[in-house]
Amino acid sequence: MTAHSARHGSVAVITLDNPPVNGLGYDTRRAFAAHVQAADADPAVTAIVITGAGKAFSGGADIKEFGSPKAIAEPNLLSLIRLLENCGKPVVAAIHSVCMGGGLELSLGCHYRVAAPGASIALPEVKIGLVPGAGGTQRLPRALGVETALNMIVSGDPVKSEVLAQVPGQKLIDRMIDGDLLAGALAFAEEVAAVRPLPLVRNLQATHPESDAYFQFARNTAKAMARNFPAPARCVDCVEQAVKAKFDAGMVYEREAFVALMMTPECKVLRHAFFAERAASKIPDVPENTPQRPIAKIAVIGAGTMGGGISMNFLNAGIPVVMLEMKQEALDRGVATIRKNYEAQVKKGKLKADKYEQRMALLTTTLHYAEIGDADMVIEAVFEDIEVKRVVFEQLDAVMKPGAVLASNTSTLDVDKIASFTKRPQDVVGTHFFSPANVMKLLEVVRGAATAKDVLATVMALGKKIKKTCVVSGVCDGFIGNRMIEQYSRQAGFLLEEGCTPQQVDRAVEKFGFAMGPFRMGDLAGNDIGWFIRKRRYQEKPHMRYSKTADLLCELGRYGQKTGAGWYDYVPGQRNAIPSALVEQMIADHRTALGLAPRKISDEEIVHRLVYSLVNEAAKILEEGIASKASDIDMVYLTGYGFPLHRGGPMCYADTQGLFNVVEDMKRFALNPHDDADFWQPAPLLARLVAEGRTFNNA
């Protein structure tokens, strides 16, 4: 059942019923239209109420139909809205929970709207590179006022119903309903049943006292804030039409903008990211109905930067945390840092003081393992050394209650080996948070050979609760993200030896769209971390060649921002990266020692060597089953490594460039005598896709 109808006296109630968010798919639209037509034709019906079953009024278009003929098949959304406007009886939308996209546009076609408090209302199409396509840019400014509507449309962010109801002069919400929404909607419908003429949003006027100046300012702002995406500026153009053109002309303009944007590469990659984020939560052999373990209390081992950041995620979600350290001073520092972070949010107005106190009240500390045994899940965030992990997990195995989830925040170490330190490997899982853990969206969930399916399902659901994008990785050195970034970093080092400066490499990569180039990133993270890992690599993988420039840098004590000097120089108290003459001379001396003459290297070569090194390693990761799908790898890089969103992630970018062209470039890189020719041999999966004319997206 996708929509159903029931009579309450003389009022027909039509309910959208297409879980989980009452998406307006083809079958739902057909059923809905039939119920509206039947109610309109029934002489016993004097008014119609439209609502949604479950936890949404309607979330809009059915994402499962995106790009298919069903998405535009009649009756399409525009036809449904016209049907509602032309209905001979008053139609009242009873809005609750979620009213977004096409759901909001549908409600704007009704004659009246009532709403429950707490409903999230939005036109989020801009987030997938589009303008609203069923009159949202024309009706919302008429119902809500130009400036409020434009802010909502350009940002795509939801606003609560009670907030919108307070907007002066608004005609979006005719009445807020406290208590039973359906009862309130029925009472309202009976009140207006005989009122004529029936009010239409399309007949309202959208005005602004200084429209030319306002829209030019808004357009300039949109372009500056979203320079890689055309949709925000087109949203401004469409809303301007709502003010300056007649309604029907504005509708034509909006539709043309919608269709044009649908074909842009930016829209395609945003839709790819939209679907990829949702697909990441799907694990092929773990059904969605897999039972989950209850998680009511978390223990975190370590009160340092990572331990404190991890703890904040759970405190933010209302989950009690007990934080363990070996020394009281370390605990005190950790708690002080958490307080400082929250106080900064309070000062900026991002967190209310009472919420801050509530969160801190959920945090307790201890110096004794015996006092964390009742926690449902424990996350270890200690030094990245396998022997240190052994000590921790042997103690956790001894004290944690049966069924507790034992998680490690390791970024590179073998989760199976860590699990072997316990007598319950089925309860062990990797939870690789990214720094700062309370800010970064990515959570790599590392599945060990013995990790139980219910543990995996539990951690994935918990990750969603703390607002992380969770991606499952198998066990390998570095998992998905860090295994790939190692090849990226190796290429960055080779580029220095061949003639680049750190700032040239960073500038090219940042121009491509990365938030930060590899050398600025190294200075921020701490160059000593990479040095520590390379020392281990020299023992474990003696065949793998690295540039010695990074080691030479660390031997000078230039670990990055924390020491005031890294690849760049830094002024105390500032983060501005200043090119270092000392570092450039060090690189030049090293280049001379290798017998290399510097050559001119283009930005295109810099970008493609770095990005295609990610792609080739990722193809191996897919082949080995470490990642289950290419889109998971894109999500890792979009949410954890600053890969430019408008490029869609490394795999999406490679598909966009054409895998044939990617491999041809790799062949040229392999001819470079100073590069690693063996690495540039296309991964078997990549070679196979090229031979078959396929892409990563349809592998």
Image (spheres, helix red, strand yellow):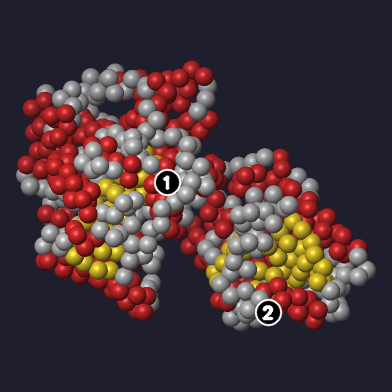
Residue 394 in sight in this render: yes
Asked if 485 appears above or below 145 in the picture, the reply is above
Q: Which residue is at a point 27% across and 48% down the rendered structure image?
A: 409
Disc number at residue 454? 1
Give the mark, 1 or 2, whose residue is nearer the N terminus: 2
- Helix, strand or loop at mark 1: helix
Q: How far from the left and from the top, in percent, is residue 153?
A: 58, 62
Q: Which residue is at a point 69% across and 49% down the rendered structure image?
A: 25
Q: Is there a contact, CB below 8 Å, between mark 1 and mark 2?
A: no
Q: Which residue is at a point 9% across and 38% down the rendered structure image?
A: 552
Quadrant of the image occupied by residue 527 = top left
Q: How far from the left and from the top, in percent, is residue 95?
A: 66, 69
Sort mark 2 into few (<14), some (14-19) or many (20+) by Cα contacts within 10 Å.
some
Q: How far from the left and from the top, in percent, is residue 458?
A: 41, 50
Disc number at residue 591? none
Q: Is 76 on the left or on the right of 599, as rendered? A: right
Instruction: State the CA–CA distance, disc 1 to disc 2.
Output: 45 Å
Q: How far from the left and from the top, in percent, is residue 235?
A: 59, 59
Q: Between residues 268 and 576, which one lies in front from this camera angle?
A: 268
Residue 568 in sight in this render: no
Q: Name the residue under label 2.
A: 175
